[in-house]
Amino acid sequence: MNQTLIHIDHPKKMPLETNFPIQGWIVSHFDIQKIWIEPDIELSFTARPDVEQVHSSYPYIKGFVGMGYQHNLQQDKLTFHCRLDSGEFSYTIVLEPLPPTQFVDVFTSDFRLPPKVCIVAPGPNGREYYQKIPNDFYIIAVNKAVLIPEVQADVWMLNHMTENVQRWYGEADAKFNGIRVFRYSASVTMPPSRVKEGYFFQTATMPSEQLNSSMPESIDGVIRAEGSITGCAIQLAYNFGVSEILLCGVDMSGDRYWDGTINIQASHGNTWPVSANVNSLIKWLAAEKGIKIFTLSPTKLEVPKYKPKKVFEVLRYKPKKVNSGRKKTYQSYFRKVLIRLGVYKLIAFVLKRTTDFPIWANLEIDIQSSCNRDCEFCPRFWDRSGVRKDAKGNQIIAKMPSEKVYNLIDQAHKLGFQGKVKLHRLSEGLLDKRYVEFAKYIKLKGLRLLENTNGDVLRKNETLCAELDGLIELLTIGLYDYKNEAEKQAEMAYWRNRFKKTEVKFSLPPENCIIRQGSKVYAEVIKNPKALDLPCIQPSRMMLIRYDGNISLCCEDDGCHFDLGNAFEQSLQELWWSYKHIKITKTLAKPGGRHKFARCSRCYNSQKTINFLSGE
């Protein structure tokens, strides 16, 4: 048996930054006294329970961590020296060359952030506060926080690709569909990924350039090291237009994550040493730049506690939904009282008559939740929120009660609505056997029934086609499976022959695919930031009601992120002419309005569509 074994977790490839983390472990039959790299940079010992399990036959087991610098390297070699009670020895590793990154330098890109950002770290103190993150804050998840189930992150920041990170990286890579901003070294050492685009940042790592306990001179156009990944995220937020920063789970204490696991390669102590550096950064941003920084959860940082909106603001903004099983918050209770007292009804009555805000043109009622297909271009594809699919990717099967459907149609009719009605929302309405009876009722009310379908149900059911022919005014059939022009024309001829009274049109995703959030396509295509500067009028034209009664702002808001209310609790008039709905809609109708809202600031629905057949 070998008397001593040494293993280097990181680095294994040539580092491109001035300094770089060093991690590894050593086991021996002799007492381990010291380990260092040239010229004389001593590394710190840490516990390594994972190594203890594998190499339990060795009496002496220690992990080590530290920082190395470019001048410590002899070309492509890094030499370690170790002192045991039996003597000293050296161990040299040859570093592999780094491959080029496909990510783009964030400081030379069109990357931008909205004014309000919440930085979520994986500390356990954040567990009770995820549901309290305000809806109007864009979320940056750092490191493992991207896996927190209750947090729907918009940006994922990653610092290092260490062995500890590699334990959970695969799961995060598969689940996350937002924007990635990785440190350069992580972007070139990450395992093979389905996502090829993202941004990288480099840190100023020379000792004179790093953050310290003194106020920094400037962080304009730079991200300084020695502030943890949270410090990097704060600097990123400042550099890209954020004026208010909220922290959650940024404990700056210990090595435990929110899920009970432990970072086995770190030993930060009760208070992280870099806390003083981050405190200086925060004070400088507040004093010199007017940046507001608060914390939701307990932290070792010197940051004021975030104060939520005052109770009277509930009149304008609905509080965040509370998970089933949790006690209702005071604000949600107060809101229900206001509903019962008719306050919202009065507000809608006044705003309907005093504002230039006409009724919607399109009404979509989601009569059931499921779809028989799982298309890569559909926002359902990556959903694991429990709306369309559960955490394991299984479909949610639910139906809107029939009496609710009829009531919504009646309400729309009484409000004078005479426009278009559809009976789906990211679902296949024709899977519902009640469809024909609902369709007949809509026509009885003098409304126009339009429908979108993938055609699978109709292809197998000639009787249903005959019942719907003429009952549906316009039927748009999605053609997903053709490979060439001849197959496409054959499909079109087939469907036109099936329907004689109903007008038939076709959607052609293989040639005209829209970039939609939540889809696989969204994560893989190159997006044009200029699309985000365009005005959006969709919310002013559509009333979208999900199968559970919740209201979506537009077709990109199946998660109902804006908390516009529930049609089972309030009338359509109250929901459409609410102060909040009108304000959001009018803001989005202006150029640049998308940047005011986190969900809209990453919507590329108006970008040029993609032709998968031609590759354009």
Image (spheres, helix red, strand yellow):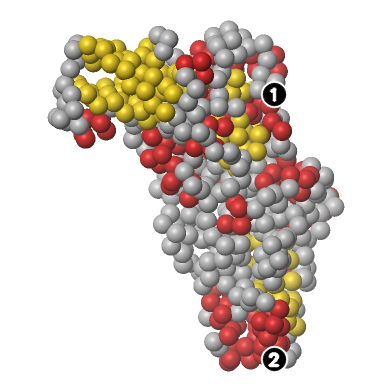
Residue 208: % across, % down: 59, 10
Q: Which residue appears at 59% of the width and 23% of the height? A: 203
* Residue 569 visible here: no
Give yes or no for contact between labels 2 and 1 (Cβ–Cβ under 8 Å).
no
Q: Mark 2 is on which residue type?
A: Asn
In the depicted structure, whether residue 60 falls above or below residue 563: above
For the view shown, which residue lies furthest in the front direction? Answer: 75
Pointer 2: what residue? 497
Give the position of the C terminus as an image quadrant.
Answer: bottom right
State which quarter of the image contains the N terminus: top left
Task: Give the residue number, with chain letter if any, for mark 1.
Answer: 221
561, above or below 31, in the image: below
Task: Determine whether 532 is above or below 94 in the image.
Answer: below
Q: Position of residue 209 (x, y in %)?
A: 60, 13
Secondary structure beneath disc 2?
helix
Q: Is residue 140 above or below residue 472?
A: above
